[in-house]
Amino acid sequence: MLERLGYPPYATPLQGVERERMRALLAGTTGPAIVVDTGSSWLDLYPPHPHPVIILDHHQYEGAPHPPPLPDHVALVTPVDWGVDGMREMCGATLSWLFTVFIDPVNWDNAPWGLSGAIADRQHVGGFSGLNATLVDEAVRRSLVQKRPGLALFGPTLGEAVVRSIDPYVKGLSGRPDAVKVFLERIGLDSKHATDSLDPAGERTLHQALLTRLVQQGVRPEFCETLRRERYLLPSLGVDAEELSNWQNALGRASAPGTGVALALGDSTAWAAGKTAETAWRSTILGGMRRVEDGGVNSLEALQWFESSETTYAGTQAGLAMNYLVDPTRPLLVFSNGGTVWKVSGRGTTWLVGRGLDLAIALRDAAEAVGGEGGGHKVASGATIPLDSRDRFLSHTNELIAKQLPRAEATA
């Protein structure tokens, strides 16, 4: 959008809840700033900036939907203030997409990046809703997106697709080539068969067999349903939106977000880098998930937690483990060592949110109690805390979640 308007932008990525870095970035910026997918909790930082600031954020902030008074040169744009659920109905990517369309309808062709971002935030699970659904439907009408149902398996052969599967993660199969080969042979399928050429009967057989495994491992119904879901083909790029989402996610996690930006701007060399990064990203996640599957997690009254050495992958590991591996009646925290701080990723489920869980409040209040900061969504939130405060932080968080989510109700 900015390049079409003749304004070459400079993009700087953030890797977490980084208030002081935001302050430093504003101090070093000699022009307007657009803050995307973060920032609505730091509204006191923007008024002193001498140039226009636009905040495009979908996260819950303290006091929402009533932001503090802001000067004319600061614009807060958030679905939360308009009764739109930022957890389900609009994410940072689709909000940014809508913003570009508002500036000029030519920017409807930003559909791949809005859609892949919403998928990265898992807002496609159970089908898009709200403003997301409106945007996707219009993109379909404009032939920018094609919808088609199918199994959520990615890989050139059936064997590779099942081995590589992380969403859903299937106990005893994901990350285990030998076990997958035996599994497929038992249901009459060849592990070397091309995934895209599987006939309807074979797809039904594979779907039923994998679904049975998920049910047996105690996965909640809404996550079992993700095995077969709506797929979104992007004709302009010739890829599935979920694959594109994985490439972009992998580049960000590999500390190469600039390559992800280049990919989005049409740099052909970035595609190969995206595919390479995705392979490493998936392998790392599978390794972390296998550690959880084999070693389990730590347990408190109201929550579960484990430690991950892969700092940039911790949030993904937390979400997938919550959905497919651990006790679904208690939220999960993952700690990763950020050098001078612990970085915390917390994940629940919409089922838990419906019973009172609000991780945004729990992690924010617990982090502030130990000298850190946190925030996010009710179902997914994060925090940054001092290294010597983990036990106190866990105690505070456990107490707060216990009040939100009594165990008797959760068990029921």
Image: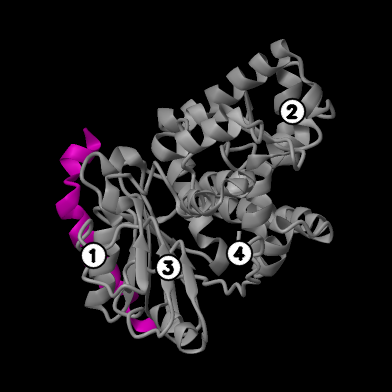
Q: Is residue 391 magenta?
A: yes
Q: Is residue 32 magenta?
A: no
Between marks 1 and 4 in the image, the one whose residue lies nearer the viewer = 4
* C-alpha span from label 1 to label 3: 14 Å
Residue, disc 2? 182
Crowd rating for badge 4 (residues with CA inside 10 Å; few <14, some 14–19, many 20+) = few
Q: Residue at x 43, y 81 (%)?
A: 51
Identify the mark at residue 2; answer none if there is no mark. Answer: 4
2 or 3: tag closer to the N-terminus: 3
1 or 3: tag closer to the N-terminus: 3
Q: Read off the magenta span.
A: 387-412
Nearest the camera: 282 or 149?
A: 149
Nearest the camera: 157 or 74?
A: 74
Between marks 1 and 2 in the image, the one whose residue lies nearer the viewer = 1
* C-alpha span from label 4 to label 3: 13 Å
Residue, disc 1? 67
* C-alpha span from label 1 to label 2: 57 Å
Between marks 4 and 2 in the image, the one whose residue lies nearer the viewer = 4
Q: Amino acid at mark 2?
A: Val
